[in-house]
Image (cartoon, grey):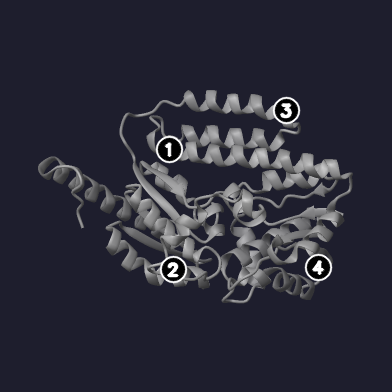
Amino acid sequence: MKLTFPHMGNLYIPLKTFFEGIGNEVITPPYCSKRTLEIGTKLAPEYACLPLKINLGNFIEAFERGADTIVMAGGIGPCRFGYYCEIQREILKKNGYDFEMIVLEPPKKQMLKLINNIKRLLKKDISTLINSARFAWKKAIILDNLERIISKKRAMERKKGETEKVYKELIKKLENISEENMLEKFSVEIEEKLNMIEEDKKVPLVIGIVGEIYTILEPFANLNIEKQLGELGVETKRNIYITDWVRENLFPKFLKPKNLNEIIEKAFPYIRHFVGGHGQESVAQIVNFSNKNFDGVIHLLPFTCMPEIVAKSAIPKVSKDYKIPVMTLVLDEHSGEIGFRTRLEAFVDLIGQKKEEYILNERLFGSGYRVS
């Protein structure tokens, strides 16, 4: 059995660590590329969303490297992600690919099925399952912390491109760490490397990124939006990181983030009920980011994403009520980097001017003044 799974940002690093730890050979697909998307687009239904198309390309590129088993997450609720696995299985089989697919459903309603599928993947004793899960979890925490710091560093670096170079080097090292006891030393190395990056003293603009999880986490799908904004002097903060998703969806109730429900309640005046995916959460986080004085928010979604289309309909009212600029960007296989960059630059100019106006008015009229 040679396992593979779809890419979603740096998630492949903890996943590879976990599956190899429990005794499997893992074939990681090549990083997402135009070829990946072209392959998936040819096979997928026209109105399937961007993540499904890229995932199909990932699988075929992994087959080319020798993979014969796909591990895919399942889902529940109104989002079409819940039946991605079945659609992908049918498309791939129809096109002549011979493989096995193991679907890991969320534990909420299918705990027994989840346990049985994990047993199929477990080639060693139960203690290796626990140890591998802990090792993978620690890598995921390091990745999330690193990405939070890198975002600020990119916006403040004195020598352009230096942060990205250090980031890629650290990601490669983390990927190759094979022993859990090496992580503590690696965390010290991260701190030392990042402290060596010289910074300007300017205070960067801060933009929150909300929306559909795949387009937030996968840089190929979002045209590397965080790197592009960093080049424009903007610090970004996402509404969701890898460990957030795991805590919310896989952890038992008593280990879930205590403030999760409090944040979701912020969406109630606009979207009262769960609409699938992270649609309700996107609206809630815009309110949350506004309360934290973010300078603006970018809402990302793949074309035809139903939960985020619901969120999109509520966003103009949220933006007006909380006086925070929000730009929605819809992504599909036709999205072009030049037009995308132009929209980012225009949005950054807008919020930069708004911030200058705010600072001026604060000096003239005192703190607490907020421009509309």
Upstream in sequence: badge 4 or badge 3: 4
Mark 3, secondary structure of its residue? helix
Q: Which mark is residue 181?
A: 3
184 shown above or below 100: above
Does residue 338 appear anywhere in the picture?
no
198 up-or-down from 230: above or below? above
* Residue found farthest to the right: 124
Is disc 4 surrounded by few (<14), some (14 to 19) or many (20+) residues within 10 Å?
some
- 346 relative position to 47: left or right: left
For marks 4 and 2, give the one nearer the viewer: 2
| Disc 4 to disc 2, C-alpha distance | 37 Å
Q: Quadrant of the N terminus?
A: bottom right
Of tags 1 and 3, which is closer to the observer? Answer: 3
Precedes in sequence: disc 4 or disc 2: 4
Disc nearer the start of the sequence (1/3): 1
Q: Residue at x 46, y 40 (%)?
A: 151
For mark 4, give the secondary structure. Answer: loop
**Dot placed on the residue nearer the N-terminal end, 4 or 1:** 4
Give the secondary structure at mark 1: helix
Report the residue marked by disc 4: 97
> Left or right: 213 with respect to 158?
right
